[in-house]
Amino acid sequence: MSSVKEILTRRPVAAMIRLTVPAGAARPAPPVGPALGQYRLNLMAFCKDFNARTQKYKPDTPMAVNITAFKDNTFEFTVKSPSVTWYLKKAAGIESGSSRPGHIVASVVTLKHIYEIAKVKQSDPYCQYMSLEAISKSIIRTANTMGIKVQKELD
């Protein structure tokens, strides 16, 4: 239950914006500029903060960003790690998954790859309370739907 002070200090939200921006490459050009500009948010402040938070990732890594724009032209944002499918494609060394998953195997990854991806995804806000085993099972299911076979060890 929220306290009275929390309720009175809440700022009215103008919009929730979801973007996918390459790590360390946020610029006030599209897609960032038009998305934030229509709510009169400070583009340069967002770009500097985003680039500072994502400097530990390789350039051109797609990062999901949730931006909360408030009516007083301020904002808050959270940066999520790249998607599981992106990690799986990089681990398997392919551009896209199978056109017929279950019939055609696009590539093969090991359980070690799955475990490493799960450790990275555990830092995400939505996965931080999940066990490593549960995250790994979810990643294995995603790999199966992409046509990527999961083996104990590579032959």
Image: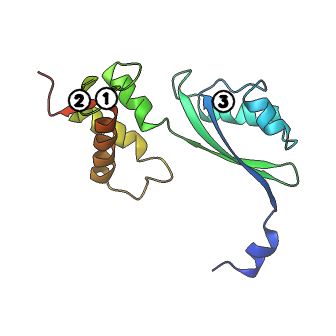
Find out whether the residues at labels 1 and 2 contact each other: C-beta distance under 8 Å: yes
Where residue 39 sits: x, y (%)?
85, 44
Q: First in sequence: mark 3 or mark 1?
A: 3
Q: Residue at x 81, y 74 (%)?
A: 8
Report, in whole angstroms, how far the alpha carbon at label 3 lies from the one at label 2: 41 Å
Q: Relative to 47, is 38 on the left or the right?
A: right
Q: Is residue 125 above or below residue 81?
A: below
Nearer-the-camera pick, 108 or 52: 108
Q: Which residue is mark 1?
A: 100
Nearer-the-camera pick, 105 or 21: 105
Q: Relative to 39, is 2 on the left or the right?
A: left
Where residue 149 sits: x, y (%)?
23, 31
Check disc 2 and give the amino acid type.
Answer: His
Q: Residue at x 72, y 29 (%)?
A: 31
Q: Which quarter of the rendering shows the C terminus?
A: top left
10 Å neighbourhood of mark 3: few (<14), some, or many (≥20)? Answer: some
Q: First in sequence: mark 3 or mark 2?
A: 3
The dot on residue 132 is: none
The dot on residue 51 is: 3
Q: Secondary structure at mark 3?
A: helix
Q: Which residue is mark 2?
A: 103
